[in-house]
Image (cartoon, helix red, strand yellow):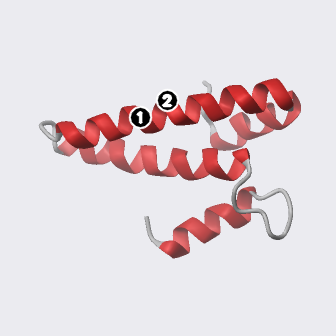
Amino acid sequence: MTEKTKSQIAKEYRLHEHDTGSADVQIALLTDHIQKLTSHLQKNVKDHSSRRGLLQMVGQRRSLLDYLDRTDHTRYQKLIKKLNLRK
């Protein structure tokens, strides 16, 4: 992930002007990285170390989503809808 992409995602999902580490931003960054790794793994089936990293990221995103759901359910709903995570 390039720095430009990272800053664009942070700018889109931040809660205030200097926000770089809120749960919303972290979840959005993880989602972007997960999508890129998923497409990589579809082409490179035997890349097991990347698959393990992908599973760790999915677990980390799940934990952050659970935290956000517990603390601010409306923000959780908005983020899920914006990232298109639930079908």
Rendering coords of residue 76 (x, y %): 78, 33
Distance (Cα) linking label 2 and label 1: 5 Å
* Residue 56 image label: 1
Residue type pointed to by label 2: Gly
> How would you rate the neighbour count of disc 2 (Cα within 10 Å): few for under 14, some for 14-19, many for 20 or more?
few
> How would you rate the neighbour count of disc 1 (Cα within 10 Å): few for under 14, some for 14-19, many for 20 or more?
few
Element class at badge 2: helix
21 vs 17, nearest the viewer? 21
Q: Is residue 53 left or right of residue 33?
A: left
Reply above or below: 67 against 57: above
Q: Which residue is mark 2?
A: 59
Residue type pointed to by label 1: Gln
Reply above or below: 64 against 40: above
Tags 2 and 1 touching, CB below 8 Å: yes
Rendering coords of residue 83 (x, y %): 64, 42
Residue at 44% x, 44% y: name it. Answer: 34
